Image (tube, rainbow, N blue to C red):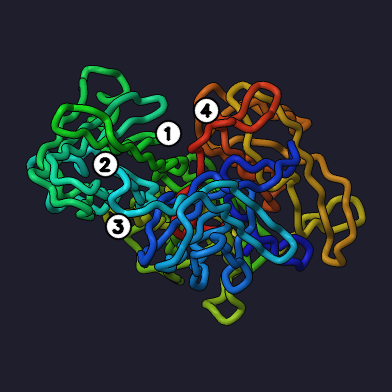
Amino acid sequence: MKYVYGIPKILTFLFLCIPCLISAQGQITSVAPSAVYPGQVTDIIINAMGTSFKSGVTVVNFGAGITAGKADVINSETIYVNVTVSNSAQIGSNDVTVTTGKDVVVKQGAIQIFSLGSGVKATILVTPAQTIHLSDFDPNNVANAPLLFTATIYNDAVVQDLTVVFTFTGQKMGEIVTATKVFKSEPADKIESITNRQFDKYQVSNTNTPALQAAIQTGTLPADVYDYHIQVLDANGKDVADADGTNTIINQQSKPILISPGSSFSTDPELIHSSQPLFEWFAQANSVNLNLYEVYPGQTTAPAVALNRPTFTISDINSSTFLYPAGATILEVGHTYAWQITANYSSVSGSSTLSSDLNWFTVSNSNNSIGKHTLSQMSVSPSEITMGPGQSYKFTAKGYDANNDTISIQPTWTVVPADGGNIDYSGNFTSNNNEASVAIIASCGEIKDYATVYISSGIGANGALWDVNAAMRQIFGLPQK
């Protein structure tokens, strides 16, 4: 947790929701599968935007004929619900209503109840993921690919040949992969469920495009809105059913960045005035591990220090701050220490880690005084926003002493990574022209605070939300700041 004058400040990553710039009412963006039949028991995933779903509080209503189980809240904008469709459910479309306390969001006609045999139907349930690799579509290793989606095909009341065509497309990347699955003499009213591991043939699209070439180099697809399209063709090649699902990737695995305390090994160690520092970092990861090392005389490089036995270590921190425990090894005045975090990432493709650089600092017994006050904490406002490429926003910073009284400060402003944009001495930030996540840092000596900025082309020049029908956040366990 991040503390501001003694109050824990939980910062939840909210994609395409900008409370500091605009006022946007929450909305349901998708319900998948969007078609069910009488007697069916199935899981349904609901994705939303600008909502605050809460475990144990949020309830879902699918309308007459559909009984919903307890909502499994994945995050503030994603819910899984197991439903049972009554054998006597009336054919037609139902509204879906999600209630969280006094907050109610409704998607009209979001789920269709159809009769088996009344026509070919298709649904698709996408597994939310924040990392997708080109190797996940390796035609030579399909059986071992991670589970990316499940498609369900409902046949008509006749025996017929059906061909299922899957197309994977990025809004910016264009078409990436196609795949086919053929069902010969499919029995009447037959229901087929297939995953991405069960298609007969995969074909990667034109790899000469710059975007795919870059993906081939890194092995990971970039941030984008990805569409999963299912098309069902009959024996004559006629389109008899379609289904769509989406997955929005905004949080690419990137090297974590240390905020405070300390400075890089390219400069002298920063003086800090506490033997119980608050460690802060910028990392969009599932969790992090922290190691603290004592720097011994003669050691002047990070690689040399990293070989030392850690003075203190802690694993699986689920926030972006950590207060050094009073019961841990005492950090002695005049001694120099270095610290590093390792970010832990998880996706449908497995787990991975990335480590930050090392920062170092020297413990001093002097005070961080401003006039007659001693600065003990800062707060940057807003703490989190989303803005478009090339847009500007003014950040402000307040200082507080140990009594929580406000102190007038003139902080130094920096952007991390530096190529994320420019900021002047007054806190006026202008984003760059690329989609990224950056930290805006305000510093007064060792005292620092920061805000998170998401630069997204989903935000127009006037600050309005990107109105894309399938844009959603489908993320498991996105870490809190």
* Residue 15 falls in image quadrant: top right
Are discs 1 and 3 less than 8 Å apart at CB? no
Q: Residues within 10 Å of mark 3 (few under 14, many from 20)?
A: few
In this view, the mark in front (1 or 3): 1
Element on which disc 4 rests: helix
Q: Residues within 10 Å of mark 2 (few under 14, many from 20)?
A: some
- Measure how far apart labels 1 and 3 are at the Cα level: 21 Å
Disc 4 residue type (three-letter): Asp
Please name the residue that numbered disc 2 is placed on: 133
Disc 2 residue type (three-letter): His
Please name the residue that numbered disc 3 is placed on: 351
Please name the residue that numbered disc 1 is placed on: 224
Label 1 or label 4, whichever comes before in sequence order: 1
- Measure how far apart labels 4 and 3 are at the Cα level: 28 Å
Q: 60 or 20: nearer the eye?
A: 60
Left or right for 40, reference 381: left
Q: Residues within 10 Å of mark 4 (few under 14, many from 20)?
A: few
Please name the residue that numbered disc 4 is placed on: 419
Position in image of residue 129 (x %, y %): 37, 49
- Measure how far apart labels 1 and 4 are at the Cα level: 20 Å
